[in-house]
Amino acid sequence: MILLFDSLLGNFLTFYPRGKGRFGFRQQERSSRGCKDMQKGLKKLIIWVVILACGYFILSHHFIFIGKDLRVLKKSHLTLEYTIFSTQGKSIESIMNVDDMRKDGIGNLLVEEGKITEEQLEAILEKYR
């Protein structure tokens, strides 16, 4: 047996049988195997990061259907409440009656879509102040 200095472990000395690395693999086999394991781990990490980013996006935005159009509105805090909201068949008063949606700015979306005017929005908001 030959005493070799393992540069990967710094100051620690490791004993290797001649011609073989750790676990009985040759040096080249060990490094390619470690690379494949690292790629698998990195792929899992990237998948988890994408899943968590999508979850965060869903928690932090309202998806509002105004007619056939889908509009996205930023939430004031992370929640699942009113994540998907449809204005179909609802009056302007009932839409504006939802505190979270009103505070997050659904009135401005209704003005942009031409459902109400700026003056109507101000009159409705005045009721809740």
Image: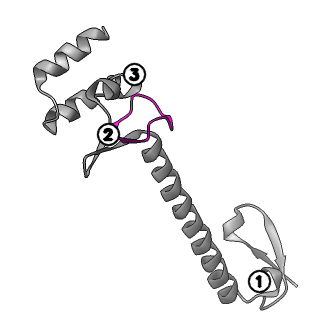
Q: Is residue 103 above or below residue 109?
A: above
Q: Closer to the camera: disc 3 or disc 1?
A: 3
Majority SS type along the magenta span: loop
Q: Is residue 90 magenta?
A: no
Report the residue marked by disc 2.
Answer: 89
Residue 119: quarter of image: top left
Three-letter code, disc 2: Gly
The reply to whether the C-beta atoms of the residues labelled 2 and 1 are less than 8 Å apart is no
- The three-letter code of the residue at mark 3 reads Asp
Q: Earlier in the sequence, mark 2 or mark 3?
A: 2
The CA distance from mark 2 to mark 1 is 72 Å
51 displayed left or right of 102: right
Give the Cα separation between the discs numbered 2 and 3.
19 Å
Few, some or many residues within 10 Å of mark 3 (<14, 14–19, 20+): few
Q: Which residue is mark 3?
A: 99
> At x 57% / y 74%, what residue is drawn?
39
Q: Give the residue number, with chain letter if any, for mark 1.
A: 21
